[in-house]
Amino acid sequence: MVASGTRTGTRIWRAIAIFLFGGVLGTAFGVAVGLFIFPYVFPPPPAAETIGEEERAALVATGQFIHADPSDPVHYGAGKVSVYEKAVFLEADFKVGPGPDYHVYLVPRPMIRASGDVRDTMYVDLGQLRAFEGSQRYPIPDGVDLADFPSVVIWCETFSVLISPADLEPAKATSHFDSGGSPVDSASLRNALIPILLPS
């Protein structure tokens, strides 16, 4: 009788353990699915942020977000990004496929094409992406040397996955031409105009 009771008790505890494990597993699965599905069902409205003219004058580099893996229909991006001395600006045509917990990174490596290209780098996290499309401004922390960061990427922190990279190209300095067709830089042009604009 004692052995029979022991076996019955063991079966009960085993059933409770299985029930609890199933509940935890089901809850975890439900949370994961919810995190993935929620941005598709309830995406934030398109952004329409602006950047000041004074800040626009300090353009450092530009790039285009791309669909790094065409075989992946979920993780993609498009549109222009502009990097200024104090901010990264996603232009009005910016767009990425929706997902959870996206962030904007400056990455110290060129030609980012896979998630592994980002994970082992000393990237700079500019903050959580506020919208899946539209213009957005992200301040750059003080002390960041932009010459060391040739890429901007959209990154999913929840699943550690690359969403879309942008290769940066240095902005071309404004130049003019003299009467002989030779280039004249802006500083030389300004110095030449001072005597004309401010006669003695």
Image (spheres, rainbow, N blue to C red):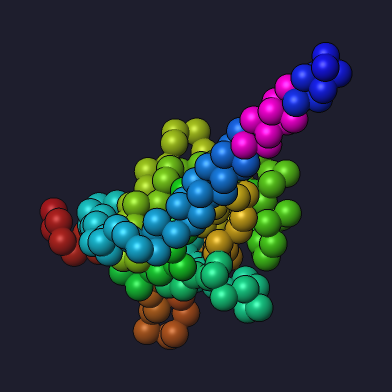
Quick check: can you spot residue 102? no
Question: As rendered, which of 58 and 119 lies closer to the eye?
Answer: 119
**Residue pushed farthest bottom?**
180
Q: Establish if 1 lies above or below 20.
A: above
Predominant secondary structure, magenta span: helix
Question: As rendered, which of 93 and 6 lies closer to the eye?
Answer: 6
For the N terminus, the quadrant is: top right
**Residue drawn at 67 percent across, 65 percent down:** 113
Q: How many marks?
A: 0
The quadrant holding residue 190 is: bottom left
Residue 64, image x and y in percent?
A: 49, 71
Quick check: can you spot residue 115? yes
On screen, residue 200 versus residue 97, left or right, reads: left
**Residue drawn at 42 percent across, 46 percent down:** 128
**Residue pushed farthest top?**
2
Numbered range of the magenta stretch: 9-19
On screen, residue 132 versus residue 169, left or right, reads: left
The quadrant holding residue 179 is: bottom left
**Residue pushed farthest front?**
1
Residue 15, image x and y in percent?
A: 68, 34
**Residue drawn at 47 percent across, 79 percent down:** 182
Question: As rendered, which of 124 and 116 lies closer to the eye?
Answer: 116
**Residue drawn at 44 percent across, 59 percent down:** 37
* Residue 128 belongs to magenta span: no
Q: Establish if 111 lies above or below 23.
A: below
The quadrant holding residue 142 is: top left
On screen, residue 196 versus residue 175, left or right, reads: left
* Residue 15 belongs to magenta span: yes
Residue 181, image x and y in percent?
A: 44, 85
Residue 53, image x and y in percent?
A: 23, 57
